[in-house]
Amino acid sequence: MKKLSLYLLLVFAAWNFQACDTKKSEDSTEQAEEANEQKADALEDANRDQAADALEDDSEFAVKAASGGMMEVELGTLAQQKAQNARVKEFARMMVDDHTKANNELKALAAQKNMTLPTTMGNDHQKHVDDLRSKSGADFDRAYMDLMVEDHDEDIELFEKMSNNAKDADVKAFAAKTLPTLRKHHESAKSIKDGMKNS
């Protein structure tokens, strides 16, 4: 009987460990989105469908923005170390400063709205960081500025959409407040990228 109990305990422990290990393979953004979906489901169960929809849409935006913001800070830090071009280094410093500020504002907003944010960037954003880590010199500078133009194109589109369509007034205000900074980053990135082509 003791052997059977011990065997069952070991089987349960192994199953439990495997279940935990499966969770680890999901990236942080997926885990945050799942947590927010569970909160939205709880609101739906309480017959608060509109609030549930608002939480789900707005939290999806917050998760993307948080992951992207972490990538901007990480890449800005990397570019300050690896970039050769002085304008690229200066741009990278601006990225770290501005996106750290925006990330902190987003964290405070998420806490206030009971939204779960990722603790690390998502796999797509991490891939950009890993790709750039492998580059150096002028090759790094070009790849970084190409990514900054492309990424800020996407950010502006997302933040414009949310500044008009977010269900929560505070989320809408955050998106609208952040947009001018993103546009400034985009213009700077394009100017630097074009200048590097001509030099």
Image: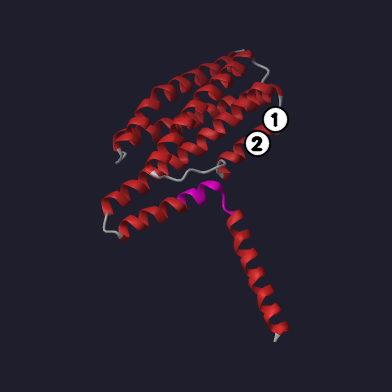
Q: What residue type is labelled 2?
A: Asp
Q: In this view, does 159 lie above or below 120?
A: above
| Residue 132 position by quadrant | top right
Other-residue count near label 1 (Cα within 10 Å), few / some / many at <14 / 14–19 / ≥20: some
Residue 12 in the image: state x and y as whole percent.
63, 72
Query: Is 116 or 194 nearer to us in this picture?
Result: 116
Q: Mark 2 points at which residue?
A: 131
Region of the chain picked out in magenta, as a range: 26-33
Query: Is 11 or 147 nearer to us in this picture?
Result: 11
Query: Is 16 or 187 nearer to us in this picture?
Result: 16
Q: Mark 1 points at which residue?
A: 135
- Residue 60, which numbered label? none
Q: Is mark 1 on a helix, strand or loop?
A: loop
Callout 1–callout 2 Cβ contact below 8 Å: yes
Is 3 positioned to the left or the right of 94 in the image?
A: right
Q: Which amino acid does label 1 sit on?
A: Lys
